Amino acid sequence: MIQLTNIEKYYANKGVKNYVLRLVTTTIKQGEFVSIMGPSGAGKSTLLNIIGMLEEPTYGTYDFLGENVTSLNERKRIELYRNHIGFVFQAYHLIDEMTVYENIEAPLLYKKVGSSERASRIADLLDRFNIVAKKDLFPNQLSGGQQQLVGIARALAAQPSIILADEPTGNLQSAQAEEIMELFKKLNQEDGITIIQVTHSEKNAQYGNRILHIADGVVKEDVTVA
Ligand code: ADP
Ligand code: ADP
């Protein structure tokens, strides 16, 4: 599903190349649940953003579902993103001026999904995540855990094959964090959605089947979780 080959990323500063990633090569198969771990500044978010097509590598090849992402123009990349990828952020990134319902609906409007199909998908997600009663509230009227449920519902609305999550429980207390991790596990095991998360938490990483340890921009270890 994902093939990264010799991926490099640097930021140039006064002619000096500051490398964030160096020659990262790895494959992630459909149905995997991968955790990316490593010290602060190791390049974890950069790697996730490259996988999610939010950033471009400065060198190397990225193939996603058989498409060579590095050779696609921006319009094609956005189309591939909208059809297959759901992104979940640490600070939720919900739109404050939109209700819960409208936040979940936004990606469906981009994809021009018809109104009855939109309504039925949103109703399913609200029901599944137990937030029907919150649908007309705004993000700042919700607890952090509820906001993240909305963030995940929004990411799922377009029925992606893969969820990318950058420290999805980083702003949550442990009970809420556990609820979110259990949800990811279910989405992976029951719905077959591929999940890649960045996490600092060894406990969160154990929900997945594989841990990539990144340090100084390289994959130091690639471990299968028992
Ligand atoms: P991690 O997620 O492991 O903490 P990041 O991928 O966020 O690491 O960042 C890795 C390194 O890249 C950091 O040293 C960071 O300062 C640098 N970096 C990230 N974005 C930029 C940018 N836009 N310009 C310059 N340096 C950047
Ligand atoms: P948690 O224990 O998950 O952190 P909170 O104490 O933040 O939860 O919120 C508890 C309940 O109060 C939630 O159901 C949330 O929807 C509701 N709530 C929190 N803040 C507001 C607010 N500003 N306006 C309306 N309802 C709120």
Image: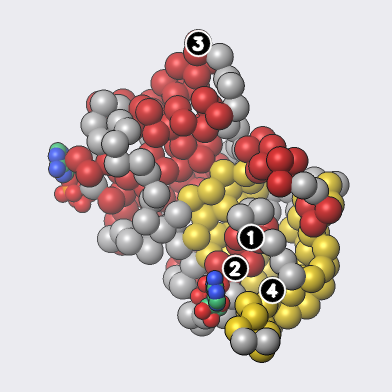
Queried on whether the Cβ of the residue with tag 4 lies below 8 angstroms from ligand 1, the answer reads: yes
Question: 118 or 176, which is in the foreground?
Answer: 118
What residue is shown at x 28% (from left), y 51% (from top)? 144
User: Which mark identifies residue 135?
Assistant: none
What residue is shown at x 45% (from left), y 36% (from top)? 153
Queried on whether the Cβ of the residue with tag 1 lies below 8 angstroms from ligand 1, the answer reads: no
Alpha carbons under labels 3 and 1: distance apart:
34 Å
Which amino acid lies under the numbered mark 3 shown in the image of this protein? Ser
Which amino acid lies under the numbered mark 4 shown in the image of this protein? Lys
Instruction: Return the disc, 3 or 2, that comes first in the chain's sequence.
Output: 2
What residue is shown at x 77% (from left), y 47% (from top)? 73
Q: Nearer the viewer, mark 3 or mark 2?
A: 2
Asked if the residues shown at circle 2 and circle 1 are in contact, with their CB atoms under 8 angstroms apart, the answer is yes
Q: Nearer the viewer, mark 3 or mark 1?
A: 1
Queried on whether the Cβ of the residue with tag 2 lies below 8 angstroms from ligand 1, the answer reads: yes
Asked if the residues shown at circle 4 and circle 2 are in contact, with their CB atoms under 8 angstroms apart, the answer is yes
Asked if the residues shown at circle 1 and circle 4 are in contact, with their CB atoms under 8 angstroms apart, the answer is yes
Alpha carbons under labels 3 and 4: distance apart:
43 Å
Question: Is disc 2 placed on a helix, strand or loop?
Answer: helix
Asked if the residues shown at circle 3 and circle 2 are in contact, with their CB atoms under 8 angstroms apart, the answer is no
Alpha carbons under labels 2 and 1: distance apart:
7 Å
Would residue 96 be visible to someone looking at this image?
A: yes
Q: Write down the residue under mark 4.
A: 9
Q: Write down the residue under mark 1.
A: 55
Q: Write down the residue under mark 3.
A: 116
Residue 173, compared with residue 21, is above or below; it is above
User: Which mark identifies residue 46?
Assistant: 2
What residue is shown at x 55% (from left), y 60% (from top)? 197
